[in-house]
Image: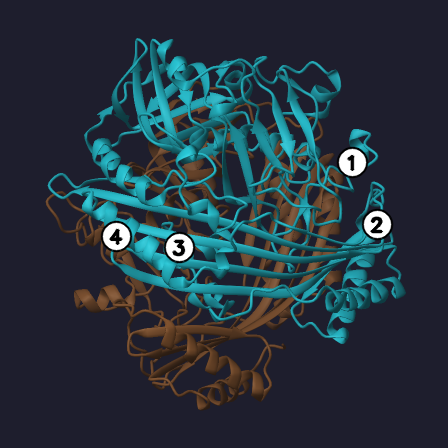
Amino acid sequence: MKRRDFLYMTGLGVGATLLPKTNAFARAVPLDAPWTPADAAFKKKLADVALNAARSKGATYTDVRIGRYLNQFVVTREDKVENMVNTESYGVGIRVIANGSWGFAATDVLTNDSIAKAAELAVAIAKENSRLLTEPVQLAPQKGYGEVSWKTPIEKNAFDVPMKEKVDLLLSVNDAALKGGANYVNSILFLVNEQKYFASTDGSYIDQDIHRIWPTFSITKIDEKTGKFETRSALSSPRGMGYEYIIPREEDKIRGVSTLYRNRYDMLEDAKQGAAQVQEKMKAKSVEAGKYDLILDPSHLWLTIHESVGHPTELDRVLGYEANFAGTSFLTLDKWKSGKFNFGSKNVNIVADKLQPGSLGAVGYDDEGVGTKQWDIIKDGILVNYQTIRDQAHILGLNESQGCCYSQSWSDVQFQRMPNISLQPGKTPLKVADMIKNVEKGIYIIGDNSFSIDQQRYNFQFSGQMYYEIKNGQIVGMLNDVAYQSNTQEFWNSCVAVADKDDYRLGGSFFDGKGQPAQSSAVSHGSSTARFNGVNVINTARKI
Amino acid sequence: MPILSKEEAQALLKKVLSYSKADECEVNLSGSDGGNIRYARNAVSTSGGISQSSLVVQSSFGKKVGVATINEFDDASLAKVVKRSEELAQLAPENPEFVKNLGPQQYGPDAKTFEPATAAISPKFRADAVAASLQIAKENKLIAAGFMENSAGFNAMMNSSGLFAYNTSTNINFNVTLRTEDGKGSGYITKGYTDVNKLDVAAATKIAAKKAAGSATAKALEPGKYTVILEPSAALTLLETMFFAMDARSADEGRSFLSKAGGGTKLGEKLLDERVTIYSDPQNPELPTSSWNGDGRPQEKITWVNKGVIENLYYSRYWAEKKGVKAIPTPDGIIMLGTNDSLEDLIKGTEKGILVTKLWYIRSVDPQTVLQTGLTRDGTFYIENGQIKFPVKNFRFNESPVIMLNNLDALGKPERTVSTESGLNALIPPMRIRDFTFSSLSDAV
């Protein structure tokens, strides 16, 4: 699912309505479609057609991905169901190496003849491009796994939950927000199921069934007299889970100035508090620009981690493969090789991971058939590693890939995508309330909002959903018009405290964009609440 | 599926409708073939060829709607997909905002949206183009990363109320970033056309090379308010954020920059400098687009902003019906009027200012004022007494296109460009703006 298709179908996003209807709805399928993945033996036969066809045309390596990508949306506003959509995309993508060069072709006609033709086209493209190589592709060794499978450990398949139950939940959420004083409310339940079959000439036949869920809403309050409006978005997070994520559980709630959620989300409760908070935002005082100590909740900090740690540690960016679009990185190889590049303070320990249960990045094997793992990226503030895939692992002196290869669909070529990148909790017991007690002049930020960072990941600006002013260790009220700007290295070196593991939560996105043609990837970022001293805050209020 | 002719598409769609038992049925059919190539570090990296097609059937009983799709086209499959959509419609809750089918429509003459030369692009053509681009990079001791993508396709639509629409289109996009070997200079160019014959990969690469070499010794200027000249692609990325917010319903509901204190909207009010006129026209020879939009509405020439006055907003069919107005759809391309002045003329007429060639990572900060943040990228230059004096380090900006188009100083000659943020194609002039707000410096190159 591409971000712009999602925006179109859900009616979210300002530019969404410029997109043609036919593209967005082109892959909808009936609600009664079977959710069971196709038989692995059938897919193995198709995959072998591609492997054999490519080999016979001169490919020295081939991988085949037969993918069935399912999405379900329930889209509502106020008391109406705007859309119920099931989409399906089914096809095969074939990637080859021939004459030392990559080639790729994809088709949605799953006959032996069509698959063989696509394999031949991939080889022809590889051969055509090989004259433009400076060096042949070098793949890190990878053992074949034989016939294996992996499934997201879900408790309740959300696709199996009756549509009525989902509709009733969203309409009750909307009702709670309207009763709480909101003027408008949009709510969405977004489900993803990737049924992916991977086969390669290394001897792997990997069948995976991957599930994700994202419940979210946006509440709007309007003051018609002044023409002012404010919104408050859900404090949920997209997760690699089943329907259990939206079955509330008391032990997963963190009570404070706003209730926050760990591994279970209470959508109805959040809508009620959101309606109250959006009205508080309308009355909040405009921030005075200057330096503040920031206390950043995981529902906000995930995005700062994503942009300022996740992206600059992607090895393909460091090397220049993304120079024409996403950009390069300030974390150049010499900084890593020195072994002492001071990325952040000693409180900053960041781990890359493709295993964490409930996270968006968790899979058994990546999209080039590599088993997944966990490794350090920043250790005690020092840059110690990157994220990479098979054709770049040798640049780091690695004998195997780190398993970070992903493609958003059968029709796009797989490439390096971010694993979960998470800030580790503080090792000594520290509660958020105790962190706030020590702040003289600060802002406690909850929820994500606007985000922007330069193409080498130095300068960034972020804003949030709620800003609580801290004066002399006390929360004294809400602020508005807040955005903070910083430089990545300066910011992470100003990290003076990270709360302990009891506060650890996952945030994340379904729509991390990268590559040309642009592809979306889902990724989680965990952290506990963290404190950053002396960060530059600007006032964003304007008059038009 | 190959690209079906109008007659072939019509025959297939008629057959689909013949299976329908619903109150109303609407069918969309599309297919495309395309390819792409990427290069980086002065060598090709990935590339591919993609072929796909789809048939979408929407059936409705009263206000109950169901949608099903298929990509097999034998008679049994066509009958099956219609039946599935009908079963689904019977299960669905009523949608109070459901709008009945459009009847037969009159569309304008077909714009030249399909060029056979673009449809005939082969893997060899793409590889040759990349070779030409790489040659320029190597001659100039620069490192290239670029992308070329082409596609050819058709869209057709028919409903049980007599509507039929069909069009074909081709598109080619090329963009490249050249960087100096020391990583201190960077230049970019992007081009998009219906007709591949208009694309000159070598000429485009040379412009990016010049920017890369010219930006290598950037000096830091203090952030603050500056006169800026925005090249067309940079101007478009900011301008489109305002255009994307011109939805009538949001304005009527009080949650748009076009909503007025005390209720109502700013439709008909002068909101921007009187030199600002923005329109769309499917027939424009430089920017031909489809004569119909995805839900069957005709695309006509529409003026959105006339001499600074907000003249039209776009509507969903439901909202237009509710408000009793014409349901103007969102256009496929936008055009802003300018003058005959070149970019060089604008530079010559600038006492002190900054030339911005590209903006990057633009995100909404406040929808109330359409305030955006983002950064300059790939070539930013200081101008004094009508001449480019030296390259400057990149800035972060916080600026609203509404404020920007009130601080308009001069416009140049519009040219076809592609948004590096949304992919939107447009004809946009370069523009000189007073008091553009740069709020911090970036070390990024």
Instruction: For marks 2 and 4, give the one nearer the viewer.
Output: 2
Q: Cα distance, mark 2 to mark 4?
A: 54 Å
Chain for colour brown: B
Identify the residue position indicated by label 1 in the image: A393
Q: Is residue B46 left or right of residue A262?
A: right
Which three-letter amino acid code belongs to the residue tagged 4? Ser
Q: Cα distance, mark 2 to mark 1?
A: 18 Å
Disc with the residue nearer the chain's start (2 vs 1): 2
Q: Secondary structure at mark 1?
A: helix
Please determine whether, in this image, residue B4 is positioned above or below residue A136. Answer: below
Identify the residue position indicated by label 4 in the image: B250
Say if mark 2 contacts mark 4, CB within 8 Å.
Answer: no
Disc with the residue nearer the chain's start (2 vs 3): 3
**Image quarter of the C terminus of chain B:** top right
Q: Chain of mark 3?
A: A
Asked if marks 2 and 1 fall on the same chain, the answer is yes
Identify the residue position indicated by label 3 in the image: A16
Identify the residue position indicated by label 2 in the image: A144
Which three-letter amino acid code belongs to the residue tagged 3? Ala
Colour setup of the view: by chain
Which three-letter amino acid code belongs to the residue tagged 2? Gly
Within 10 angstroms of label 4, few (less than 14), some, or many (20 or more) residues? some
